Image (tube, rainbow, N blue to C red):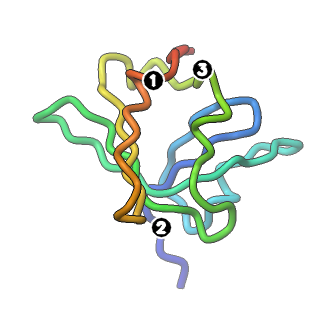
Amino acid sequence: MDRKQPKFIVTKEGRLRLGMVSRHCELLKPGEACRGGGFYELDYITHCLLLSGASSEYGEPEWEDFESITLSAYYRGLHIVYTSWDSWKKEFHVSDRLEIVYE
């Protein structure tokens, strides 16, 4: 039985895509390459999109390789934060460090 979980990926082109899937690769469209992924949670109290962890298929997102991220306009107004499962790494405030392009 495949258990669907809230997962995200960042494509090579800088698209942040979220969905309820069993495997991160299900979020890729044909011909796309992935630059990492993990899990997500929406915190409606603090207006945050919380990203965390790493994809078992693609590893942690490579945020430092991007100047901007493209995301669905549905998430406009949310503060986006990524937390690594590696306790030595600091939180990466995606919406503060990268330009967010909504579509």
Could you tell me which residue is drawn at 37 percent across and 18 percent down?
76
In space, the residues marked 3 and 1 are separated at their CA atoms by 9 Å
Residue 61 x, y percent position in the rendering: 58, 48
Q: How many marks?
A: 3
Going by the numbered disc 3, the residue's amino acid type is Ser
Determine the residue located farthest toward the left in the rendered image. Answer: 45
Within 10 Å of disc 3 (Cα), the crowding (few <14, some 14-19, many 20+) is some
Residue 78 x, y percent position in the rendering: 30, 25
The residue beneath circle 2 is: 4
Going by the numbered disc 2, the residue's amino acid type is Lys
Residue 2 x, y percent position in the rendering: 54, 78
| SS class, disc 3 | strand
The residue beneath circle 1 is: 97
Q: Is residue 23 left or right of residue 83?
A: right
Within 10 Å of disc 2 (Cα), the crowding (few <14, some 14-19, many 20+) is few
Going by the numbered disc 1, the residue's amino acid type is Arg
Within 10 Å of disc 1 (Cα), the crowding (few <14, some 14-19, many 20+) is some
Residue 56 x, y percent position in the rendering: 61, 71
Foreground pick, 103 / 90: 90
Could you tell me which residue is drawn at 49 percent across and 55 percent down?
7
The residue beneath circle 3 is: 68
